[in-house]
Image (cartoon, grey):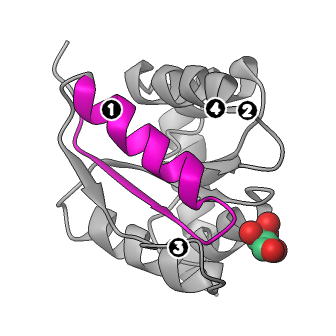
Amino acid sequence: MDKKKLVLASDHAGFYLKNALVKMFTEAGYDVIDCGTDSDASCDYPVFAEKLCNTINSGEAELGILCCGTGIGMSMAANKVKGIRAACCSDIFSAKFTRLHNDANVLCLGARVVGEGLAWELAECFVTTPFEGGKHARRVGLIHDIENKQ
Ligand code: RB5
């Protein structure tokens, strides 16, 4: 299976988890772009969510992973960007089905919610699961119709 190009980003709360995932994906042979943050100094998660989403929309990466404290702020911010379908997941079933049925292109993880081991399982499941297409493609299209009407 060909490996998708990935982009990762975090705020201060997700900094160590993001670094751990960058290392694990790099060692697993993935091309990884790291959009920061670069330290555990307090910063604003929407800034990094937007950077990551722009990297996906420019075509430099296909899938993204955002880490903050809960994963929720990152998902709210990312879902404001046109073309982005971000899912905050802390269980494997959701991480798998948001790829299969929603064609999610961003996974959001809460570093204060999941440990490094589970985060890796979630992230690996997310990046290796394909979109099922078919009727799900129509539904994803309807999501973007809503976006275009705003
Ligand atoms: C930072 O303290 C925290 O609010 C942030 O990482 C995130 O959890 C927001 O949703």
Disc 4 residue: CB within 8 Å of ligand 1: no
> What residue is shown with label 4?
116
Are the residues at dot 4 and dot 1 in contact (C-beta closer than 8 Å)? Answer: no
Above or below for 41 versus 35? below
Q: Is residue 65 visible?
A: yes
- Mark 2 neighbour class, 10 Å CA radius: few under 14, some 14 to 19, many 20 or more: few
Are the residues at dot 3 and dot 1 in contact (C-beta closer than 8 Å)? Answer: no
Q: Is residue 7 magenta?
A: yes
Where does the magenta region start and end?
4-27
> What residue is shown with label 3?
49
- Mark 1 neighbour class, 10 Å CA radius: few under 14, some 14 to 19, many 20 or more: some
Q: Nearer the viewer, mark 4 or mark 1?
A: 4
Q: Nearer the viewer, mark 2 or mark 3?
A: 2
Are the residues at dot 2 and dot 4 in contact (C-beta closer than 8 Å)? Answer: yes
Q: Quadrant of the N terminus?
A: top left
> What residue is shown with label 2?
115
Q: Quadrant of ligand 1?
A: bottom right
